[in-house]
Image (cartoon, rainbow, N blue to C red):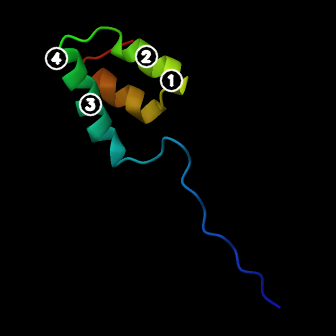
Amino acid sequence: MAVARKPLKAKKGKNPDSIPATIQFVKDRITNGETGVIERWKQKYSTFPRSLRAALEQEGITF
Protein backbone atom coordinates (compact mmCIF):
# COMPACT_ATOMS: atom_id res chain seq x y z
CA MET A 1 0.00 0.00 0.00
CA ALA A 2 1.51 3.29 -1.12
CA VAL A 3 1.04 6.48 0.83
CA ALA A 4 0.34 9.59 -1.20
CA ARG A 5 2.41 12.56 -0.17
CA LYS A 6 1.18 16.11 -0.26
CA PRO A 7 3.17 18.55 -2.41
CA LEU A 8 5.46 20.84 -0.49
CA LYS A 9 4.10 24.27 0.37
CA ALA A 10 6.10 27.36 -0.44
CA LYS A 11 7.42 29.09 2.63
CA LYS A 12 5.89 32.39 3.64
CA GLY A 13 7.53 35.28 1.83
CA LYS A 14 9.27 33.08 -0.69
CA ASN A 15 7.16 34.01 -3.71
CA PRO A 16 9.51 36.02 -5.95
CA ASP A 17 6.65 36.99 -8.29
CA SER A 18 4.99 39.10 -5.59
CA ILE A 19 8.08 41.18 -4.78
CA PRO A 20 7.82 43.66 -7.73
CA ALA A 21 4.12 44.19 -7.04
CA THR A 22 4.78 44.82 -3.36
CA ILE A 23 7.60 47.25 -4.12
CA GLN A 24 5.35 49.16 -6.52
CA PHE A 25 2.59 49.23 -3.89
CA VAL A 26 4.93 50.71 -1.28
CA LYS A 27 6.40 53.23 -3.75
CA ASP A 28 2.91 54.35 -4.84
CA ARG A 29 1.87 54.91 -1.24
CA ILE A 30 4.97 56.97 -0.52
CA THR A 31 4.51 58.96 -3.75
CA ASN A 32 0.92 59.78 -2.75
CA GLY A 33 2.25 61.38 0.42
CA GLU A 34 1.21 58.72 2.87
CA THR A 35 3.46 58.62 5.89
CA GLY A 36 4.06 55.60 8.05
CA VAL A 37 3.66 53.03 5.26
CA ILE A 38 6.60 50.95 6.46
CA GLU A 39 5.54 51.20 10.11
CA ARG A 40 1.99 50.05 9.34
CA TRP A 41 3.37 47.17 7.29
CA LYS A 42 5.57 46.11 10.22
CA GLN A 43 2.60 46.22 12.59
CA LYS A 44 0.44 44.14 10.30
CA TYR A 45 2.96 41.51 9.21
CA SER A 46 5.50 41.81 12.08
CA THR A 47 8.48 41.10 9.77
CA PHE A 48 9.67 41.75 6.25
CA PRO A 49 10.98 38.85 4.19
CA ARG A 50 14.70 39.26 3.54
CA SER A 51 14.21 39.29 -0.23
CA LEU A 52 11.63 42.08 0.03
CA ARG A 53 13.82 44.06 2.40
CA ALA A 54 16.78 43.78 0.00
CA ALA A 55 14.64 44.82 -2.98
CA LEU A 56 13.27 47.85 -1.11
CA GLU A 57 16.78 48.89 -0.10
CA GLN A 58 17.87 48.68 -3.74
CA GLU A 59 15.05 51.10 -4.57
CA GLY A 60 16.32 53.49 -1.89
CA ILE A 61 13.60 52.76 0.66
CA THR A 62 15.15 52.02 4.03
CA PHE A 63 13.61 51.37 7.40
Gap between marks 3 and 1 measured at Cα: 15 Å
Residue 44: mark: 1
User: Percent position (x, y) of residue 42?
Assistant: 48, 19
Residues packed near mark 2 inside 10 Å, few (<14), some (14 to 19) or many (20 plus): few
Can residue 18 be seen here? The reply is: yes
Residue 2 at x, y percent in the picture: 78, 87
Q: Amino acid at mark 1?
A: Lys
Q: Report the side of 26 relative to 10 (left or right).
A: left
Identify residue type, mark 4: Thr
Asked if marks 1 and 2 touch (Cβ < 8 Å), the reply is yes
In the depicted structure, whether residue 53 falls above or below residue 39: below
Q: Which residue is mark 4?
A: 31
**Horizontal and vertical percent for residue 3?**
77, 81
Q: CA distance from mark 3 to mark 2?
A: 13 Å
Q: Which residue does the numbered mark 2 point to in the structure image? A: 40
Pointer 4 local density, CA inside 10 Å: few below 14, some 14–19, many at least 20:
few
Task: Give whichever of discs 3 and 4 has the lower sequence position.
Answer: 3
Which residue in the rendered view is the most extreme toward the bottom?
Answer: 1
Of mark 3 and mark 1, the one earlier in the sequence is 3
- According to the picture, the residue beneath numbered tag 3 turns out to be 25
Tag 3 secondary structure: helix
For the residues marked 1 and 2, what is the alpha-carbon distance in whole angstroms? Answer: 6 Å
Look at label 2 and name its amino acid: Arg
